[in-house]
Amino acid sequence: MQNDDSDEEHPYAIKELPGQKSKIIRFNEMLPPSVHTILSVGFSRSGKTTAAIQMYSNKKFPFKAMFGNGERIWLISPTYHVQSSWELLNIPMDHKHKNYDERVLEQVIREAENDQNDPKLPRLIIIDDCISQLPMHR
């Protein structure tokens, strides 16, 4: 007989703040803060993209909700259109780009600057398989 852990609390579960409305949440302190950078380096076909997709699409891991269930995620990847697994992140089509472009980053920054929420809502930019397109000077 297999042990059913479905009711067990996930170690990275989102918790409500005591005494606050239920929509106010706090991320588990074991997670990186909302501003974080992850660099994944490995050989071709080593699982870098799969790891990113699984981390940001897992229902028990709070990152998907953190980024508006895909609404505040941008993807820059020359292969996103042939990798159906990206669909798990629910990224809007106008947030998917095949090539790195400074204008994409400028648009994300402008949107963040105009965000009327306090604190501003977090955004995620995933740059996948396009390191050769990145500027060499920074």
Image (cartoon, grey):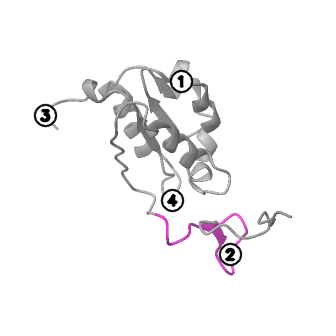
Q: Residue 84: which disc?
A: none
Callout 4 amino acid: Asp
Determine the secondary structure under disc 4: loop
Residue found at x 61% / y 56%: 61
Please tell me which residue lies in front, 116 or 73.
Answer: 73
Q: Which residues are magenta?
A: 14-31
> Badge 4 is on which residue?
118
Please tell me which residue lies in front, 17 or 21.
Answer: 17
Does the magenta portion include 63?
Answer: no
Position of 99 relative to 62 (above/below): above
State yes or no: discs 4 and 1 in contact (Cβ < 8 Å): no
- Cα separation between marks 1 and 2: 35 Å
> Badge 3 is on which residue?
137
**Looking at the picture, how far across and down is residue 85, in whole percent?**
60, 31
Mark 3 surroundings: few (<14), some (14-19) or many (≥20) residues within 10 A: few
Q: Quick check: 135 left or right of 44?
A: left
Q: Residue 94: which disc?
A: 1
- Cα separation between marks 4 and 1: 25 Å
Q: Residue 20: which disc?
A: 2
